[in-house]
Image (cartoon, rainbow, N blue to C red):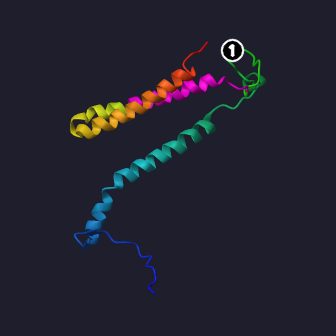
Amino acid sequence: MRQASFAIPTIKRDNKRLHPLERQRVLLNYLPIFIFMIIGLAIGLIAPTLGYLLSPKRPNPEKLSSYECGFEAFSDARAPFDVRYYLVAILFIIFDLETAFLVPWAVVFRHLGWFGMIAMGIFLGLLTVGFIYEWQKGALEWE
């Protein structure tokens, strides 16, 4: 029985191993991405830390009280919402995604040919069926 090998695979090109200098050149292509990730991580950690350390900390009852559009809180913040708010949010997400898919599709429409046309037709057909269903269930009527 053969034992499994856990050696790090080497980079090959045309069934030949890369020379160490060529391997180093390939890895150097990823250096800008690595630097970008380090800078992003540093900014993401340093900025909130500096804000916390440098901000004035003078709590008083007025600052610590709950604030609701200039009024005193008149009910529990965890009160249930009407389900229609959620339905409107879901409908917004659905049609927002439709736009997010239609714009790139329109850009490459000529290259896709009939396959792209049929695929987008199926996508839009399914969205239309969902829209008709929501309409029949009365989700679009607000009363």
Magenta segment range?
79-100
Horizontal placement of 142 versus 71: left or right? left
Picture coordinates of residue 66, whole percent (x, y): 73, 24
Q: Residue at x 55, y 26 (%)?
A: 89
**Membership of 26 in magenta stretch:** no
* Amino acid type assigned to the residue bearing label 1 in the image: Gly
**Along the viewing direction, whichever of 120 and 15 lies nearer the viewer:** 120
Q: Is residue 66 above or below residue 44?
A: above
Picture coordinates of residue 44, whole percent (x, y): 51, 43
- SS type, badge 1: loop
Q: Residue at x 29, y 61 (%)?
A: 26
**Along the viewing direction, whichever of 112 and 20 lies nearer the viewer:** 112
Residue indicated by mark 1: 70
**Along the viewing direction, whichever of 17 and 97 lies nearer the viewer:** 97
Picture coordinates of residue 35, whole percent (x, y): 39, 51
Q: Residue at x 46, y 87 (%)?
A: 1
